[in-house]
Structure formats: C-alpha cells, structure tokens
Amino acid sequence: MGDTGNEDILEMIQGKETLEFFKPTKDKVWVSETFFSVQGEGKHVGVPAVFLRTQGCNLLCRWPCDTIPIWREGELQTYEELYTSWCRNGWDIALKRDAHLILTGGEPLTRQDELTNFLQYLSKMGLRPFIEVETNATILPNRKFERFITHYTCSPKLSNSGMPRARRYRENALQFFSANSKAVFKFVIDKREDTEEVLRDFILKFDLSRTKVYLMPESTSNTELKEKSEWLIEVCKQHGFNFSTRLHLSIWDQLTGV
C-alpha cells in the first residue's frame, strides 16, 4: 500500500487510542488472516508456525507496512469455525507436533479478551501449543491472557516509524516486557543511527540485556534486505546484539500469507 493509503488511515485515527475498527463480539474473534508457514523473524526464525492475524492496530508506522492492507480487514469467526478450519487443513496436528501458534497483527494485544477466550476454547479441545505473541509493546497483557503465552516478540517502534513518541513509547509496558523472561525485543533498523536510539531509550533506560535484542533491517524487497543486512550484521557484532533476517521477504519477496 502506498503513502496515500497510510494517510487515509492516519486521518481516521486522529485522537483515537486504538485502531480497533471492528468492535469485539462475544464468543467470536476478528480474523484478518490465518495460515501455516514458518516464523520469519526474531528468535524462532524457521520454526513451523500457524499464524493468527487479528484485525486492527493501535499504531500506524509510516514505512510501507506489508500487513496494513490485511489487518484493516477482517472476518468475524466463531471459535468453532476457526478451530474447524485448522483441523480441516491439518494444522491442529502440526500444533500438536510442536509448531508454534503465533498471534500477530496489527496489534493482537488490542484483542486480548477475544484471544483469551479462544485460547481457553483450544485448551478445552486438548490443544495447548507453544504460543508466541508479536506485539509493539505499548499495551500491558492482562493476567488471564498472560498465563497462556509462552513467548513475546516485542517490536517497539523507533522514531523512524514516524509515530509520535507518546504513542509508540509506553514506559509501563516496556518495563513489564523488559523484566519478563518470556520476552525478546526486535527493532526495525533503517539507518545506522537508529542503533543509538536503541541503546539510549531501551538498553540503558531499562537495563535490557543485549542477548534479548534482535536488530532487523527495514526493507520492502529482497534486494533492499540484502543490502542493509550486510552492514547491520556488522552493527550487531559491534554491540553484541542478535541479527534477525526477514525470512519471508528473502524467500517470497513481497508475497503475504505464506
């Protein structure tokens, strides 16, 4: 989606706290897409995973986010409908064989109640997978939701995202995730100078262990990914950070849902 689409969304959300376009409905969840692939970023890159992308987000980054056209839309599904579709595709078997269930968006923590109830439903059906949440780390998980989660991949937005600091940088949430043994941090890096922001606002501010930090190139094509990866790997070596590729981009380029 181009800049015009982003500006249209930005106009829609001025003064609003979240981008939950579609209101929650009892015993159902708003699903933008769900598919079976492998984790493409962060600590568990390459691990087979069932992705559940929920509708809506509370941020709107100004770089070309490849999921904006997807999380803007959604289909309301009952828990039974969603679970049955997974079983029909054999994804329940994959989850029982230790594939991860990845809750992503948009921002899945804007839909905690819906997801908590769905995860309770899965548990009743005998499905208790490794559950990973991809979050922008602006929202605190509640206790009911937190007890289901195995891992958080936190991706706080830097100034390069174009979002106002007050909207993207929430100290209470960042403090929670920094102290949470289940969480790692993944930062999208566009230029070398972005690393200074990571050091100042996260490493020093929250005494964040560098072993929990992953730097990932901001890129919209395989070519750009390769170019930025070459110098970003050197930055990671210099500062003791982990490097994260974007596996889906390197394999399928700009194709989504894979």
Image: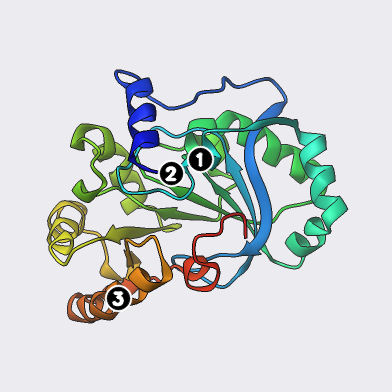
Question: What residue lies at 72% left-to-right and 53% top-to-bottom?
Answer: 128
Nearest to the eye among marks 2 and 1: give it.
2
Q: Position of residue 27 (x, y in %)?
A: 72, 25
Residue 237 falls in which quadrant of the image? bottom left
Asked if residue 139 shows in the view, the reply is no
Q: Amino acid at mark 3?
A: Glu
Upstream in sequence: badge 3 or badge 1: 1
Q: Position of residue 18 (x, y in %)?
A: 40, 26
Q: Residues within 10 Å of mark 2 (few under 14, many from 20)?
A: few
Label 2 vs label 1: CA separation? 7 Å
Q: Are marks 2 and 1 in contact (CB under 8 Å)?
A: yes
Q: Compared to 43, does 194 lie above or below?
A: above
Q: Which residue in the structure is indicated by mark 2?
A: 1
Label 2 vs label 3: CA separation? 22 Å
Q: Which residue in the structure is indicated by mark 3?
A: 227
Q: Compared to 67, does 58 lie above or below?
A: above
Left or right of residue 61, residue 84 in this image: right
Figure quadrant of the C terminus: bottom right
Q: Position of residue 52 (x, y in %)?
A: 63, 47
Left or right of residue 125, residue 185 in this image: left
Nearest to the eye among marks 2 and 3: give it.
2
Q: Which residue in the structure is indicated by mark 1?
A: 69
Identify the element where label 1 is drawn: helix
